[in-house]
């Protein structure tokens, strides 16, 4: 799908640029020319930036999860760096940005 018709920029190009590190509409404009002509694509392109509705950028983080017993609310919070319970193992948690 085309995001910017003026510069023939596709959704795939925008996603690729964001995956490569673009974090603002200015970054997309510099790299791809998005929103540099009529500007009608700016809102759509911004949805692909981190935190946007169509963002593919996500945050991966490990946290300690007990291997037995009941989960307490305190175990759901992020542990200190390097501190893990003796009876736990890390599970990667993926959170969409």
Image (tube, rainbow, N blue to C red):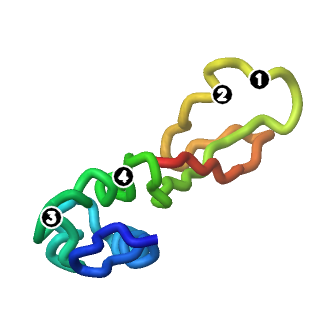
- The image quadrant of residue 48 is bottom left
Badge 1 vs badge 3, beta-carbon distance below 8 Å: no
Front residue (pair 43, 54)? 43
Q: Which of pointers 4 and 1 indicates the residue nearer the eye? A: 4
Q: Which of pointers 1 and 3 indicates the residue nearer the eye? A: 3
Distance from the alpha carbon under mark 1 to that under mark 2? 6 Å
Residue drawn at x 76%, y 23% is 71
Q: Secondary structure at mark 3?
A: helix
Q: Residue furthest right?
A: 68
- The image quadrant of residue 23 is bottom left
Disc on the earlier residue, 1 or 3:
3
Badge 3 vs badge 2, beta-carbon distance below 8 Å: no
Residue marked by disc 4: 47
Distance from the alpha carbon under mark 4 to that under mark 1? 36 Å
Distance from the alpha carbon under mark 4 to that under mark 3? 14 Å
Residue marked by disc 1: 71
Category of crowding for the residue at label 4, using alpha-carbon neighbours closer than 10 angstroms: few (below 14), some (14–19), many (at least 20): some
Disc on the earlier residue, 4 or 3:
3
Front residue (pair 84, 93)? 93
Residue marked by disc 3: 26
Disc on the earlier residue, 3 or 2:
3
Residue 26's spot in the image, x, y percent?
A: 15, 64
Distance from the alpha carbon under mark 1 to that under mark 3? 44 Å
Badge 1 vs badge 2, beta-carbon distance below 8 Å: yes
Q: Secondary structure at mark 2?
A: helix
Q: Is residue 2 left or right of residue 86?
A: left
What label does residue 75 carry, if any? 2
Q: Is residue 50 left or right of residue 92?
A: left
Disc on the earlier residue, 4 or 1:
4
């Amino acid at each position: 799908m085309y995001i910017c018709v003026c510069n023939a920029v596709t959704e795939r190009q925008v996603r690729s640029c964001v995956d490569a590190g673009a974090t603002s509409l200015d970054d997309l404009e510099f790299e791809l020319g998005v929103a540099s002509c009529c500007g009608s694509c700016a809102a759509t392109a911004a949805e692909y930036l981190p935190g946007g509705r169509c963002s593919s950028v996500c945050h991966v983080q490990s946290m300690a999860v007990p291997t037995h017993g009941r989960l307490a609310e305190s175990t759901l919070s992020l542990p200190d760096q390097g501190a893990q319970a003796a009876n736990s193992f890390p599970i990667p948690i993926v959170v969409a940005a």
